[in-house]
Image (cartoon, rainbow, N blue to C red):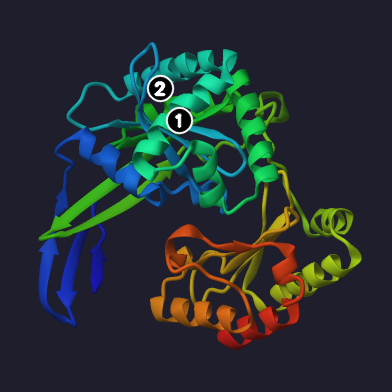
Amino acid sequence: MLECLNKKYMSIIISSNGKNAVKVEKSSFDKEDYLQKYIYDNPESIPLYEIKEDIHLLILAREFPTNSGPIDAIGIDKYGELYIVETKLYKNADKRTVVAQSLDYGAALWKHSNDFNEFLSILDEHTQKIFKLKATEKIKEFFQIGDEEVSVLLEKTRTNLNDGIFNFVILMDNLDDRLKDLILFVNQNSQFDIYAVLFEYYKHAEYEIIIPKIFGTEVKKDIAVSKSNSPRKTWTEVTLLEDAKDKYSEEEFIAFKRIYDFSKQSADEVRFGTGMYASFSPIFQKFCDKSLYTLGTDGRLSFNFHWIDDKDFSQKYKNALESIGFTIPTNFNEVRPSVPPEEWVIRAEEFVRIVGEATI
């Protein structure tokens, strides 16, 4: 059981079945290397879902070599957008310098646009070492996409690299107002984005508690300074259904609309995506403040197990999906499994039935 007491930093009370309560004060990371490794092993701890709900970050490399020094980590999302991740702890000098340092790394990385194959080759070295897979194979596995979709993703990555369009993510354990102002200024007046992620760190015995807060999402860019090649687009119900009707066969569209209509009627909220493909994600507050599943015009129905707070429900949900013929991997809570149209179209009616029964 966890309880939080509001202060400048929270104190956390840990107890076991309401007994033996222990107050845990905020701790600190001793070394940046530890924070770097933690993020590499747990990329979902970076709250990029506050930027866009369906962003899932795949960290492809640590200590990526450049002429300006090694980048702490490089990540990618399913839209082919690149993330330069840097850490800076409170005991170090003026945090504003990390913005300049990150931009310097971005400029150094941009040089790889002259030889995209070399860039992929360096990523391959890292993914082979950590995952025993080439970068393209890891991307395919992580995002649950096919060869054609990987090609599209990599072409977007190539374009973003060529145009120097990056997402800079700065991880730290303290953040002052001057740095916040600098980040807002840069985001308002550039085609790239800088996000500062503040980590509050608590440690008790072998347990670690990390509370992430992200800054820099406040700016909504004008068209003049928006990412020139960003695949993102704001979707509405009308454009969602138009795109689905355009991309799907008549049978597929009927199944798509059946799941959408059910979601609209049954969920507490339906959120629309902002990617190159239209998508919708229903929120059932009974289980989580994020979506239970996501269906898009890219053909994928994704099951968002990792956002379900109730793990007993998560297991029952998995079992129910398997009972109607879906194949769900054993590590379903980690990989956000998805299925193609040939699997969900024929099961659309059964799918809405089991979700309806589960969420009553």
Q: Position of residue 336 (x, y in %)?
A: 52, 60
Quadrant in the rendering for residue 353: bottom right
Q: Residue at x 70, y 73 (%)?
A: 263
| Residue 125 vertical placement versus 29 (above, below) | above
Q: Could one spot residue 78 in this view of the protein?
A: yes
Which quarter of the image is occupied by the C terminus?
Answer: bottom right
Viewer can see residue 185: no
Name the residue: 40% across, 37% down.
128
Q: Residues within 10 Å of mark 1 (few under 14, many from 20)?
A: many
> Which residue, given by chain and number where applicable, does mark 2 sit on?
102
Q: Nearer the viewer, residue 28 or 276?
A: 276
| Amino acid beneath label 1 | Leu
Label 2 vs label 1, nearer the camera: 1
Q: Which residue is mark 1?
A: 123
Residue 120 at x, y = what percent?
A: 52, 27
Residue 15's label in the rendered image is none
Q: Quadrant of residue 89?
A: top left
Residue found 53% across the figure and 74% down from its top: 285
User: How dense is the environment of label 2, judged by Cα within 10 Å: few (below 14), some, or many (20 and up)?
Assistant: many
**Left or right placement of residue 173 versus residue 22 in this view:** right
Query: Residue at image x 71%, y 24%?
Result: 224
Instruction: Locate the N terminus and report the quarter of the image it occupies.
Output: bottom left
**Label 2's element?**
helix
